[in-house]
Image: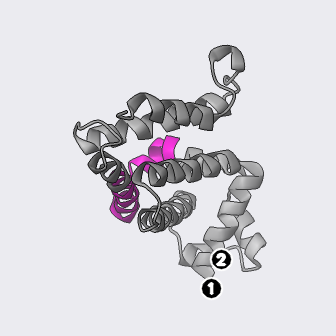
């Protein structure tokens, strides 16, 4: 593993342990055991390092969704499995999740980061399309339905992260909400 990858891994761990404020180039260098100037050989600044973490994690999602897509389970099961992975990531790594999906600086970067985000979305859209082709989901434009599913899952994760998910409001977990959403939009 190269130094750039080690720096990205260290930044991800710092995000997990202390949130975005914990990620400085100096702290990342210290965690990897390199000089405080070494990160600048790989990343222009802190923002570029955080974008590197986001891009790496998005590419992991893409590969994961591709793997799920190639599995033998029914299409609606594949979609449910992909959404479960998405939810598990958001719950296990809330700071990284916010970085990927709620940080306006990350969203506006473009380039390879935007390509990675669009590839992830496209793989999720393939799963939605497969479920539509099997007759499990409504026959509306696939990208529109994927966007709705994506937004719903993000909303549920944000609801939970903000401490607003209570049984008095109808859900006890994000996955309860995801399962309800899939039941509501499924063609029976």
Image coords of residue 177 (percent x, y): 57, 31
Residue drawn at point x = 64 percent, y = 50 percent: 88
| Nearest the eye: 42 or 91 | 91
Image coords of residue 152 (percent x, y): 47, 33
**Magenta span: helix, strand or loop, mainly?**
helix
| Nearest the eye: 12 or 144 | 144
Q: How has the structure been colored for display? A: one colour
| Nearest the eye: 21 or 87 | 87
Residue drawn at point x = 45 percent, y = 65 percent: 72
**87 in relation to 109, above or below:** above
Residue 143 located within the stretch drawn in magenta:
no
Quarter in which the N terminus is drawn? bottom right
Q: Are marks 2 and 1 in contact (CB under 8 Å)?
A: yes
What segment carries the magenta color? 101-125
Write down the residue under mark 1.
Answer: 1
Residue drawn at point x = 69 percent, y = 27 percent: 172
Numbered circle sitting on residue 6: 2
| Nearest the eye: 182 or 58 | 182
Report the side of 117 relative to 15 (left or right). Answer: left
**3 in relation to 123, above or below:** below
- Residue 49, located in which quarter of the rendered image? bottom right
Image coords of residue 89 (percent x, y): 62, 52
Q: Secondary structure at mark 2?
A: helix
């Amino acid at each position: 593993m190269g130094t750039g990858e080690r720096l990205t891994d260290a930044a991800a761990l710092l995000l997990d342990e202390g949130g975005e404020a914990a990620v400085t180039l100096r702290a990342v260098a210290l965690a990897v055991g390199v000089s405080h100037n070494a990160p600048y050989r790989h990343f222009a600044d802190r923002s570029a390092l955080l974008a590197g973490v986001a891009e790496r994690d998005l590419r992991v999602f893409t590969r994961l969704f591709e793997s799920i897509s190639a599995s033998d389970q029914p299409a609606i099961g594949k979609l449910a499995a992909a959404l479960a992975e998405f939810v598990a990531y958001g719950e296990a790594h809330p700071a990284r999740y916010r970085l990927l999906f709620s940080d306006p600086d990350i969203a506006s970067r473009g380039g390879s980061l935007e390509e990675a985000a669009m590839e992830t979305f496209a793989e999720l859209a393939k799963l939605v399309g497969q479920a539509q082709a099997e007759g499990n989901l409504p026959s509306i434009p696939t990208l529109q339905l994927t966007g709705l599913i994506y937004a719903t899952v993000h909303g549920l994760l944000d609801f939970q992260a903000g401490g607003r998910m209570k049984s008095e409001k109808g859900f006890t977990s994000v996955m309860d909400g995801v399962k309800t959403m899939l039941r509501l939009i499924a063609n029976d």
